[in-house]
Image (tube, rainbow, N blue to C red):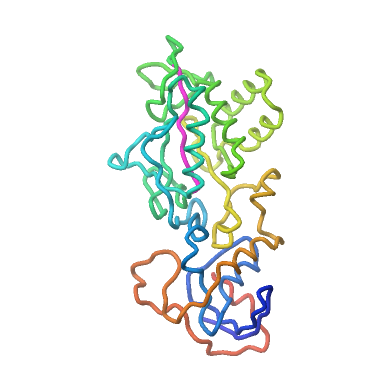
Amino acid sequence: MRTHRSAVKGRHGWNAPLVACHSLCVRGGTNTLVLTLTLLLLGGGCAHLRTGADESLSGSRGKPSNGWLSRGARLADRGPGYEVLRTDREGGQHWGASRLVAMVQRLGRALAPRSGGVAIRVGDLSAQRGGQIPRHRSHRNGRDVDLLFFARDEATDVALPAPDFVRYDRELRSLLRRIPLRFDVARNWDLVEALVRDHQAGVARIFVAEWLRVALLDHARERGKDPWVIERAARLMLQPGDSLPHDDHFHVRLACTVNERALGCIDAAPIWPWMIKDWEKGDALPNDDDAVLDLMEPLAGGELHGPPDPSRAGARVCAQPKVELAEPDFEALVCR
């Protein structure tokens, strides 16, 4: 471990030596954030995150494909306008960042009056503390949720709840089903529109097969939907290039918040222009630095912090510096 001492005086008016902490890497949106999290020292111990800041400390860490979830919220098995596909006993994963859970609940309430009594079927979110879960390469840090498509009985045109992950071909007909179904374009557009209009969640991506995306946008244009909603939906919807085409469900992903990025959350999707007010990109903006500084307090030597790791119980994670440098070696201080 390479360490150094220096002096820092910032907006809080303190002036204290810095010590590099031997802890888990925090990779944020800017070099400033990385250095701040790994270096800030108050009163002679390693800086760490304020233990009482429950709301600030909860949320997503790392990437959707390689991350974890801190103090997530659990989505109830059913609520107004929605129900989960699999219960916990059946292997369902229903934990997520609190704003993801709140988004699903808002979505159910928004669509209930227009769904004819047909609830949204919700697939997996994440595990309670994130990490790898069955059936998914992502869904590891509480920002992903699968929403099954609304369907109609092809013979009777009756609206039906999604029985499972039903695949649809380019004619919008179900594949390999005993009872043929059709992709319910109208209700599925209502779902997409509700996501676009949700300004609280920070929806960054709606993964869906390209031919279904085209059908949804064509429907919206034909029905004279708001142009700005159509434009944003066109940007948000995307067929992924590194997995199955998502012809059997919507995969919704949220962006990292400013505080989550300060704590190591990594966006795997664009921060769209309309998000700027509430979801600023961390690069070159003061907000993320302020978020880090607001969360810092002294950490006594030997205290363990970072993602849960039982194998490191009792490990000493802060060490006093052994080498003094005239000039800080910033590259050496970035976790690798």
Q: Tell me the residue at 62%/38% (across/down).
A: 236
Residue at the farthest top position: 156
Check residue 91 for magenta coloring.
Answer: no
Where is 200 relative to 175, above or below?
below
Over which residues does the magenta segment extend? 143-152
Q: Quadrant of residue 75?
A: top left
Residue at the farthest left position: 89
Which x, y percent locates residue 283?
68, 60
Q: Tell me the residue at 65%/33% (across/down).
A: 234
Q: Nearer the viewer, residue 155 or 198?
A: 198
Where is 325 relative to 172, above or below?
below
Q: Nearer the viewer, residue 197 or 319?
A: 197
Where is 327 relative to 336, above or below?
below
Which x, y percent locates residue 132?
40, 52
Which x, y percent locates residue 116?
46, 19
Check residue 144 for magenta coloring.
Answer: yes
Prevailing secondary structure class for the magenta stretch in the rendered image:
strand
265 on left or right of 178 = right
Image quarter hosting the C terminus: bottom right
Q: Quadrant of residue 303?
A: bottom left
Which x, y percent locates residue 259?
58, 58
Q: Tell me the residue at 60%/86% (across/down).
A: 5
Q: Quadrant of residue 27?
A: bottom right
**Count the marks: how many?**
0
Q: Tell me the residue at 42%/49% (across/down).
A: 73
Q: Nearer the viewer, residue 14 or 288?
A: 14
